[in-house]
Image (spheres, rainbow, N blue to C red):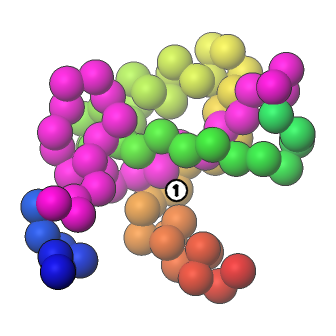
């Protein structure tokens, strides 16, 4: 069994080709496809956070950007 911090379980950045650990969660939805409360997520390292945020923001999809730690804490509170 893999430990939660093992490389096999590492949470990595969603940017194409990036293998860096994710630090940020970009919550988004496409209003043409998703209900208003639905949240899809992309993960980002520090280097790609701004680029991925801009990509989603230009399309009007970006809803929230929080640290991975905050996201996981919110999920455990639900």
| Secondary structure found at label 1 | strand
Measured as percent of width and height from the top left, residue 11 is found at 29, 56
Circle 1 residues within 10 Å: few <14, some 14–19, many ≥20: some
Label 1 sits on residue = 66
At 44% from the left edge and 60% from the top edge, which residue is drawn? 67
Q: Is residue 77 left or right of residue 4?
A: right
10 in the magenta segment: yes
Q: Is residue 1 left or right of residue 11?
A: left
* Magenta stretch prevailing secondary structure: loop
7 in the magenta segment: no
Q: Is residue 52 left or right of residue 36?
A: left
> Which region is colored magenta?
8-33
Residue 39 vertical placement versus 18 (above, below): below
Figure quadrant of residue 44:
top left
Residue 49 vertical placement versus 70 (above, below): above
User: Residue furthest toward the left?
Assistant: 7
Measured as percent of width and height from the top left, residue 77 is found at 65, 85
Measured as percent of width and height from the top left, residue 8 is found at 16, 60
Figure quadrant of residue 78:
bottom right
């Amino acid at each position: 069994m893999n430990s939660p911090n093992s490389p096999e379980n590492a949470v990595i950045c969603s940017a194409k080709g990036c293998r860096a650990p994710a630090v940020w969660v970009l919550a988004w939805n496409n209003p043409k496809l998703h209900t208003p409360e639905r949240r899809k997520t992309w993960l980002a390292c520090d280097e790609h956070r701004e680029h991925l945020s801009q990509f989603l923001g230009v399309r009007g999809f970006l809803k929230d950007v929080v640290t991975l730690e905050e996201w996981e804490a919110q999920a455990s509170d639900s």
